[in-house]
Amino acid sequence: MADTPRVELTAAAADLLRRLRAAHGPLMFHQSGGCCDGSAPMCYPDGEFRTGDSDVLLASLDVAGVAEPVRFWMSQSQFEVWSHTRLIVDVVAGRGSGFSLEAPEGVRFLIRSRLVGT
């Protein structure tokens, strides 16, 4: 299953990323695994969230209409839990309680997942 991407986007998530990129410049995701919305993927201007040795770069997502890839980071502890899944970034109505860029849009990113072979 080496060809299975670790992270993918729904059409709605890709559309929202195009709008956010136009407004904020290059983007990144980070999923920390904290409680409540901390386990949701947070979208930031690229480089605004500092990553370190306790974070794993899972993917550099190519989004049609966006000049540069959107990097998706996850905390190492979260990665250990999600390591056998494919993460699907989607968008739903409602506002999260974090600092993610989509909050003023009245929507929030969330993760759907599918198990992949080990």
Image (cartoon, rainbow, N blue to C red):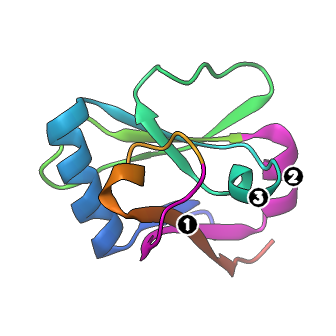
Q: Is residue 76 magenta?
A: yes
Task: Identify the residue under disc 1.
Answer: 110
Please tell me the numbered disc located at residue 36: 3
Q: Position of residue 35 (x, y in %)?
A: 82, 53
Callout 2 environment at 10 Å: few (<14), some (14 to 19), or many (20+)? few
Quarter the C terminus occupies: bottom right
Type of amino acid at the residue the image marks with label 3: Cys
| Alpha carbon separation for disc pair 1 and 2 | 19 Å
What is the CA distance from the residue labelled 3 to the residue labelled 2? 19 Å
First in sequence: mark 3 or mark 2? 3
Question: Which of labels 1 and 2 is toward the front?
Answer: 1
Residue density around tag 1, few if under 14, some if 14–19, many if 20 or more, within 10 Å? some
**Residue 77 placement (x, y as % from top left):** 87, 44
Q: Which portion, as a residue range, is magenta?
A: 75-97
Residue 17 sits above or below residue 114 on the image: above
Viewer-closest of 85 and 111: 111
Name the side, left or right, on which 80 lies relative to 52: right
Residue at label 2? 80
9 shown above or below 37: below
Q: Mark 1 or 2 closer to N-term?
A: 2
Residue at position x 28%, y 30% in the image: 26
Above or below for 17 versus 99: below
Residue 16 is situated, as x and y percent measured from the top left of the image, at: 27, 59
